[in-house]
């Protein structure tokens, strides 16, 4: 027996080589496959003369395949050597990139945290309300040329611990002062929609069964509305029954959605 060596873990049998099986008896075909197996496992060639002759085409094919396999392995080793060096270089570059990225992320996080802390601190300081002094209110009214009485505004909110009607703490006293001024300005002016006011007055006149009310307008007080009455009708309005006066006030509250109603001639 002759022995050869190879490191291949598989082999190929071509279909056209199997045509010889048609000419062999079953025991001969079995010997042939055993010879193939013996060669592939141990590289031992068959001793039987007939099987050796039949095996020769298979041996030639196996030899060619083994040579191709060796060439392929050699090329892979060469490529692997080059690729290995490149992989080492790439790995080194990747580690450096990751290190740079980590440093950058850390710096950005610190910068972001510092910016966020600074913004939160500024926002917190900005949202802290400080009760204004009377002089600050006077100075602001003079700056804006308001007609509002600064002392009246100061006393109103100071007595309420600087809370609005809903009980919420005032956040911006200047904004409240502007609102107060706007209402003060409208106290001596007719509302913009005079037609609507006249209609509302007509509704109240129907309840009173008389022409008593001329117009309705807001005073500078929050949620306050005045029912203007003609001079000659004032005595009639004051002589109405308490039930009638209450009905008129309730209707006025409903029309303008306010809490306080006052009668003025």
Image (cartoon, rainbow, N blue to C red):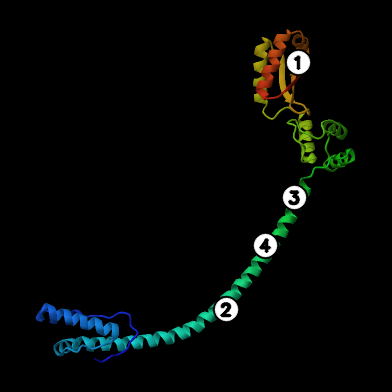
Dot 4 crowding, Cα within 10 Å, few <14, some 14–19, many 20+: few
Indicate which label's residue lies in the foreground, 1 or 3: 3
Indicate which label's residue lies in the foreground, 1 or 4: 4
The label on residue 123 is: 3
In this picture, residue 65 sits left or right of residue 105: left
Indicate which label's residue lies in the foreground, 3 or 2: 2
The earlier-in-sequence mark between 4 and 3 is 4
Q: Disc 2 marks which residue?
A: 92
The label on residue 230 is: 1
The earlier-in-sequence mark between 1 and 4 is 4
| Picture coordinates of residue 234, whole percent (x, y) | 77, 12
| Picture coordinates of residue 87, whole percent (x, y) | 51, 80
Please report contact status of discs 2 and 4: CB closer than 8 Å, yes or no: no
Q: Disc 4 marks which residue?
A: 109
In this picture, residue 16 sits left or right of residue 82: left
The earlier-in-sequence mark between 1 and 3 is 3
Residue in the image at 26% along x and 89% along y:
63
């Amino acid at each position: 027996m002759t022995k050869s060596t190879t490191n291949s873990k598989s082999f190929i049998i071509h279909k056209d080589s199997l045509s010889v099986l048609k000419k062999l008896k079953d025991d001969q075909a079995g010997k042939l496959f055993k010879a193939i197996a013996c060669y592939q496992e141990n590289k031992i060639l068959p001793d039987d003369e007939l099987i050796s002759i039949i095996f020769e085409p298979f041996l030639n094919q196996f030899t060619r395949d083994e040579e191709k396999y060796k060439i392929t392995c050699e090329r892979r080793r060469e490529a692997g050597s080059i690729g290995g060096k490149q992989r080492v270089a790439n790995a080194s570059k990747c580690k450096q990139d990751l290190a740079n990225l980590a440093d950058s992320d850390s710096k950005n996080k610190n910068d972001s945290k510092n910016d966020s802390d600074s913004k939160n601190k500024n926002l917190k300081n900005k949202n802290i309300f400080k009760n204004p002094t009377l002089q600050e209110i006077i100075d602001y009214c003079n700056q804006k040329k308001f007609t509002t009485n600064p002392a009246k505004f100061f006393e109103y909110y100071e007595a309420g611990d600087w809370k609005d009607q809903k009980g919420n703490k005032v956040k911006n006293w200047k904004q409240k002062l502007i609102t107060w001024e706007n209402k003060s300005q409208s106290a001596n002016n007719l509302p913009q929609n005079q037609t609507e006011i006249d209609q509302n007055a007509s509704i109240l006149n129907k309840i009173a069964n008389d022409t008593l009310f001329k117009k309705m307008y807001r005073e500078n007080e929050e949620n306050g509305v005045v029912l203007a009455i003609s001079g000659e009708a004032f005595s009639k309005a004051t002589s109405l029954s308490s039930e009638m006066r209450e009905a008129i006030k309730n209707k006025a509250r409903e029309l303008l959605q306010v809490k306080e109603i006052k009668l003025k001639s």
